[in-house]
Image (cartoon, rainbow, N blue to C red):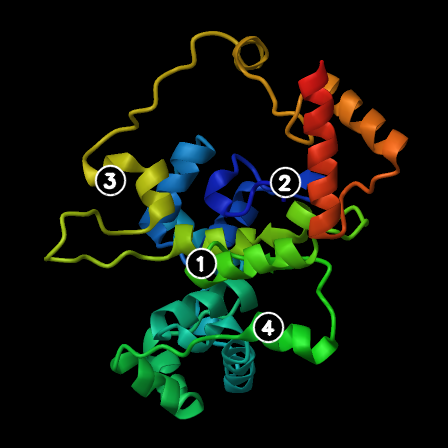
Amino acid sequence: MGENIYTPAMAQRLVVGGLPLSRNEMIAVYYHSGYTIQEIIGFLASRLNTALSARQIHRVLREMNLTRRNNQPRLEDIVTAILHELSGSGGDIGYRGMRRRLLVDHDLNVSCELVRLALTVLDAEGVIRRRQRRLQRRRFYIDYIKEINGVPVVVYADRGTENCIVRDLQYALRWNHQDPLQGLSSFRELYRVIQHWNEHTIRRNRNADCPSGKPDVMYFQPEIYQTRDYKMPIPGNLNGIEQEYCAYPPANGVSMEFEVIGTQIRIENGLNYPPNTVEEATELFIRITNYVDRL
């Protein structure tokens, strides 16, 4: 897949090993992502400009031996995958979310009922907590730092509320390191998390005026929801517009002229940059501001 193609619906044609997937292989990808036959038909039409009927899709799936009757995973594989998820960030998700993880991350197509029954056995306390709306606070990051007596080079996570705190801690603890992944480069988002969200089903809520369905289907197939794509064409060449109207912020947040002045002051006075202590930072700030005041 391309670097930013984190969900099959985003791609006009997925590429594996430098070669684009065939039509039938794309159908298999959509099938393994949990899309229905009608949703697959819609993606083939909107993304691949290919028109197939439901009967043709079923025929392709049979030829590739991709039917639910022939693809029942082993119970031990299901249990192993669920235990793996429970040991990580899956301890607070319900059976629908767990089913999505089994499908996307482990390629296990399991019914919701089987996942629900498995969780009542493998995570009985978690099931009770979720029913009572009492989720367990997670301390994975702090506990891990204490265990290894150090800071991880890079943390990969989603944009969840708790992970925003992890992100800020990771930034702070890696700020003064000198490797290429220090500071702001030490926290990365997971495309897999985005895929989980874009391919999951938003249930209908009678008390809220919001659409229901899969976000990818709602975005790429708006006609199903009796609406249309409201995107307007770009007036002209996007690269030309970007060059004319956009400016990239400087690397260190200051102009090149100011950076030259700051570097000169730092070298002449033997100051450290980045500073290692509050005192060094204060002295560097005072030296630069005094120099600028005299200009």
Q: CA distance from mark 1 to mark 4?
A: 16 Å
Amino acid bearing label 3 = Ile
Q: CA distance from mark 3 to mark 1?
A: 30 Å
User: Left or right: 289 with respect to 221?
Assistant: right
Residue 101, position as x, y percentages in the image: 47, 67
Task: Please name the residue that numbered disc 2 is placed on.
Answer: 2
The answer to whether mark 1 and mark 4 are in CB contact below 8 A is no
Question: With respect to residue 199, does 70 lie above or below?
Answer: below
What's the residue at 56%, 74% (across, down)?
140
What's the residue at 70%, 26% (across, down)?
290
Residue 163, position as x, y percentages in the image: 50, 60
Q: CA distance from mark 3 to mark 2?
A: 28 Å
192 or 136: nearer the viewer: 136
Q: Residues within 10 Å of mark 1 (few under 14, many from 20)?
A: few
Task: Please name the residue that numbered disc 3 is placed on.
Answer: 224
Q: Which mark is residue 160?
A: 1
Q: CA distance from mark 3 to mark 4?
A: 46 Å
**Lower position in the chain sequence, tag 1 or tag 4:** 4
Question: With respect to residue 15, does 105 lie above or below?
Answer: below
Amino acid bearing label 1 = Gly
Residue 49, position as x, y percentages in the image: 44, 30
Q: Is residue 117 visible?
A: yes
User: Left or right: 280 with respect to 168?
Assistant: right
Q: CA distance from mark 1 to mark 2?
A: 25 Å
Q: Residues within 10 Å of mark 3 (few under 14, many from 20)?
A: few
What's the residue at 48%, 39% (across, down)?
10
Q: Is residue 53 visible?
A: no
221 or 279: nearer the viewer: 279
- Front disc: 3 or 1: 1
**Lower position in the chain sequence, tag 1 or tag 2:** 2
